[in-house]
Image (cartoon, rainbow, N blue to C red):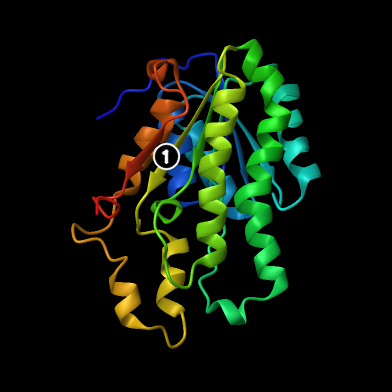
Amino acid sequence: MLNPSNMNGKVALVTGAAAGLGKATALTLARAGANLCIVDINPEALEQTASEIRALGVEVLVQAVNLASADNCRSAVAAAIKHFGRLDALCNVAAVFMPTHSTEMSDEDWNTTLAVNLSAPFHLIQAAIPQLLEHHGAVVNVTSCAAHMGQAYLAAYSSTKAALTHLTKSLAMEYMHQPIRFNAVAPGGMMTALAAGLRELPNPDTSLLSRISPLRGLVEIDDVAQMVAFLATDAARGYHGAVINIDNGITAG
């Protein structure tokens, strides 16, 4: 098991924290002592996460906002800094996943996928950089195995995750000589509400779906959360510009 360094007195902002990997990441960081700003569009589920975080003895700020808006991204970062007086880590976990036949994807769904999966991480990072530089902090972006292999019915999702991978690497190069780290984690399929959407796709070619079915099964959410949290802390000081695949070997060949 990866061990995040002591985060006592430090602050992390985690998106997508209402459920799944985002929630698991926030709880992992809370156990390491971090105070949390948690962000998601689902206020009820976000409050449940907040309750579990408070039970761990750390402070939490809840921001129930739609990250498809650039202004909301900037406001969430500003709220965290105003409330806690600092920001040490940004974990971009939130994503939308809309599997569909490409000819049937609406403009709205395409634009929403790009806004949440790619533009939101950029706007959050842009707003957070001054604080992260001041506190020698870290950004961890959650991409996907879909960034590294073509996947049928996931043209929009895969495109955003590939772009987020290269955004991570580009920022790592841009800030090579400054005290901030940029890394990414690329999970394989996990048992989350997002993944469940693939089962509802009408009339898929099952031979294409079988190509992206991991031979070793689904990835455990907590295993990915441990890596995201680890990269967000000083324990991962040697990681910069890395993209860590946790996919049970699906991208091996």
Tell me which residue sits at (63%, 60%) in the image. 113
In the figure, is residue 149 to the left or right of 57?
A: left
Q: Residue at x 34, y 74 (%)?
A: 209
- Counting from the top left corner in percent of width and height, residue 67 is at 69, 49
Q: Where is residue 119 drawn, in percent x and y? A: 68, 47
Q: Quadrant of the N terminus?
A: top left
| Quarter assignment of residue 246 | top left
Q: Residue at x 48, y 24 (%)?
A: 57
Task: Establish if 249 lies above or below 82.
Answer: below
As drawn, is 77 to the left or to the right of 176?
right
Residue tagged 1: 185
Q: Is residue 35 above or below residue 111?
A: above
Q: What type is the residue that disc 1 sits on?
A: Val
Residue at far right of view: 71
Q: Quadrant of the C terminus?
A: bottom left
Rendering quarter of residue 235: top left
What residue sits 29% from the left and 69% below the top? Answer: 211
Whether residue 134 can be seen here: yes
